[in-house]
């Protein structure tokens, strides 16, 4: 009976109902959208198998500025550290896809071939890049494309596997499609092309990026063996000291350290997520205040009705129940 009466009142006052519902919708919608953004950018774990085992290996200059790794440096670190179940590297770059007289600039990862094996990422179609122990610029120029690029530029054609595509001024072979659930490793944008070191060298003539200590552009990510976290961190630090002694010019102010990916992600998320949610919580508070003001205005307009119902024997709890039912319908 309460619900039927509340529905009749809402239908009889469509302006009030719409104003209250829109006020709440704006507040709830803003909070939902803000949390979705915060979740996508800051809170969601890496899209890999057992993300709690994944760690970033960092090169820190002068105790504060984060640097990348030389590819050769990463190889030496991988060979020396046995407290890890696996270690891999990637570098964020850009390249031009040329097809049908059109060109499109794509975000690119240059990855060691073992990346998919270490992180437990499979292929949606075809296979992943070959996990070679010593990936180099002399291997096969193979690439994987993102699910997004596969659908957008190739229409989801299953025949894409094994096909050659033109990247910059060279042709490389597509061996697989990266699943849509793995847009990238940093969560902020979709990577469309995942290239082997050989493919990067072929499409850019930049063999020095792989073979020489000239450019610190690679990020290193590893999977720590269960129970070996402290030993893994010690091995990383020791390797940093060793390379500083062997290559004083290139590593003079560089130290290596290891941080668990999930812990770092959550610690970095606290401040931006707190600020964002505090702002939208204020919006929700204002929206609720608006809805409450409308409800109070209605209560004032209903003083005669309320008096008559009390005179007929309605208790205070009975009236409150009716008003709560009306509020619940508006909120729903």
Image: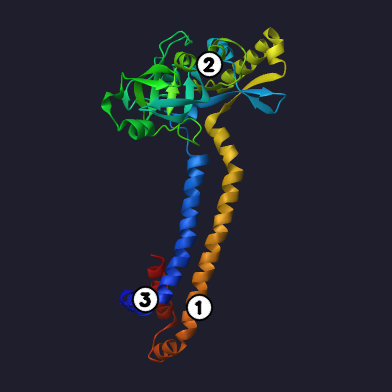
Image coordinates for residue 204, horizontal then vertical, percent: 50, 17
Residue sitting farthest toward the left:
158
Circle 2: is it few (<14), some (14-19), or many (20+) Cα within 10 Å? many
Whichever of labels 1 and 3 marks the residue nearer the N terminus, that label is 3
Between 103 and 287, the residue placed more toward the observer is: 103
* Marked residue nearer the N-terminal end (2 or 3): 3
Location of residue 6 with respect to 99 vertically, above or below: below
Q: Nearer the viewer, mark 1 or mark 2?
A: 1
Q: Judge depth for marks 1 and 3 and give the one in front.
A: 3
Near-viewer residue (178 or 259)? 178
For the point 54% across and 13% down, the residue is 210
Q: Label 2 belongs to which residue? A: 83
Q: Is residue 251 visible?
A: yes
Name the N-terminal-most of marks 1 and 2. 2
Q: Is residue 39 above or below residue 128?
A: below
**In the picture, which quadrant includes the N terminus?**
bottom left
**Residue underneath mark 3:** 10
Mark number for residue 249?
none
In this view, the mark in front (2 or 3): 3
Quarter of the image for residue 17 reads bottom left
Label ID, residue 296: 1
**Left or right: where 109 falls relative to 3:** right
Question: Which residue is at a point 30% across and 24% down the rendered structure image?
Answer: 160
Q: Measured from the top left, where is residue 256 in percent x and y?
A: 64, 20
Residue 147 coordinates in the image, percent (x, y):
36, 32
> Is 285 above or below relative to 239?
below
Residue drawn at x 55%, y 35% is: 265
Instruction: State the separation of the CA atoms marked 1 and 2.
Output: 65 Å
């Amino acid at each position: 009976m309460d619900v039927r009466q509340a529905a009749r009142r809402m239908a009889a006052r469509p302006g009030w109902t719409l104003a209250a519902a829109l006020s709440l919708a704006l507040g709830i919608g803003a909070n939902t959208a803000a949390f979705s953004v915060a979740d996508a950018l800051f809170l969601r774990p890496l899209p890999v198998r057992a993300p709690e085992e994944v760690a970033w290996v960092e090169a820190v200059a002068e105790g504060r500025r984060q640097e990348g790794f030389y590819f050769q440096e990463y190889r030496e670190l991988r060979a020396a550290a046995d407290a890890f179940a696996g270690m891999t590297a990637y570098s964020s770059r850009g390249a031009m896809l040329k097809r049908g007289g059109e060109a499109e600039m794509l975000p690119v990862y240059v990855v060691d071939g073992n990346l998919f094996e270490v992180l437990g990422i499979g292929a949606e179609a075809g296979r992943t890049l070959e996990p070679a122990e010593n990936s180099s610029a002399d291997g096969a120029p193979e690439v994987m494309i993102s699910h997004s690029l596969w659908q957008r530029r190739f229409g989801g054609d299953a025949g894409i596997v094994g096909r050659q595509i033109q990247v910059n001024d060279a042709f490389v072979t597509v061996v697989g499609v990266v699943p849509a659930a793995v847009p990238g490793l940093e969560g902020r944008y979709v990577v469309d092309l995942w290239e082997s070191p050989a493919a990067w060298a072929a499409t850019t003539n930049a063999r020095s990026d792989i073979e020489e200590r000239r450019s610190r552009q690679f990020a290193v990510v590893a999977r720590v063996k269960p129970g070996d976290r402290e030993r893994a961190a010690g091995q990383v630090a020791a390797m940093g000291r060793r390379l500083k002694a062997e290559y004083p010019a290139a590593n003079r102010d560089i130290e290596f350290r290891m941080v668990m990916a999930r812990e770092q992600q959550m610690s970095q998320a606290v401040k931006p997520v707190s600020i964002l949610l505090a702002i939208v919580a204020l919006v929700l508070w204002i929206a609720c205040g608006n809805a409450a003001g409308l409800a109070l205005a209605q209560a004032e307009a209903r003083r005669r009705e309320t008096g008559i119902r009390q005179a007929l024997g309605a208790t205070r709890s009975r009236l409150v129940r009716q008003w709560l039912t009306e509020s619940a319908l508006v909120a729903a």
